[in-house]
Image (cartoon, helix red, strand yellow):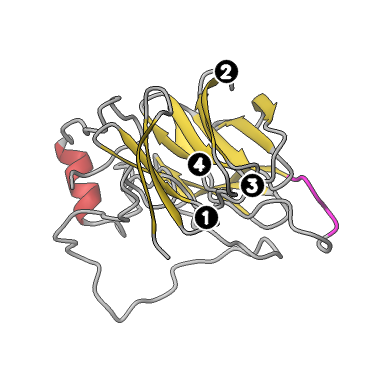
Amino acid sequence: FPRSRCHRRSSGQEPELTRKEERAESKPSELGDETPTASWPFFGRLPQRTHYLGGPIDDLDPPFKVLWHINTHALIEFPPAISGGVAYLVNKYGNVYAVRLKDKKILWTRIVRKRLHGAPIDVTGPAYYGGRVFVAEIGGALIALNAKTGKVDWKRDLEAHLESSPLIVGKTLYIGTDSNQVLAIDTANGHKIWEYKGHAAIKASPSYHQGLIYVGNYQSGMLALSSKNGHVVWRTNTS
């Protein structure tokens, strides 16, 4: 699979990396210079959700040591989205933190719940694209935050229970819902591009390859949908 950056062509192919970016990808722990660390824009890093970083990774060798840590005082279920040397992480109460990796400075926070108890608000991984951080809350809110300030650029109520981590390919965000849907959302404004409506909840996080969106549902089904219009290309059952 090709290496990844946060800005994607609609085909899913990645642009060539500069020498600085190539060096950042091969030595991701060199955080002290001006080279941005390797991007990790959403859960799984690539549209195929393979978590592939590229290699060889020159300095990714045990034994490892802790360089720094922060405490958000709540469960962090998914890894952060990373772009330009900043990690954007969300804890179970929906509180969002932008952390500069080279010195752990918190650049901004969005605190949704100050009291750290009660039912979770967020159980999905954040996504980064085009200067925005996208957060999907369990109650149905899909929120686009300005990556520099943390302010809300737009917010859309999907009117569904969300446990599916957003995927972004090109300028489109794909997400599953417990209302048996896969939705394609315009990252610029939150408008719905298309909707697939099935027969079972979709808690899984969708993946993408060669023009198709792949996702599993809660009745053992596996689906391949056209990324352009959401039409079913094929389906099968794994049980």
Residue in the picture at 56% in, 36% down: 134
Residue 138: x and y, percent? 69, 48
Determine the main secondary structure of the stretch shown in magenta: loop
Residue neighbourhood size for the residue with mark 3, other residues' Cα within 10 Å, grouped as few (<14), some (14–19), many (≥20): many
Residue indicated by mark 1: 104
Q: Amino acid at mark 1?
A: Lys
For discs 3 and 1, the disc positioned in front in the rendered view = 3
117 in magenta = no
Q: Earlier in the sequence, mark 4 or mark 2?
A: 4
What's the mark number on residue 166? 4
Residue indicated by mark 3: 178
Q: Amino acid at mark 4?
A: Pro
Residue neighbourhood size for the residue with mark 4, other residues' Cα within 10 Å, grouped as few (<14), some (14–19), many (≥20): many
Alpha carbons under labels 2 and 3: distance apart: 23 Å
Alpha carbons under labels 4 and 2: distance apart: 15 Å
Residue indicated by mark 2: 189
Question: Could you tell me which secondary element the residue under label 1 belongs to?
Answer: loop
Residue in the picture at 69% in, 40% down: 160
For discs 4 and 1, the disc positioned in front in the rendered view = 4
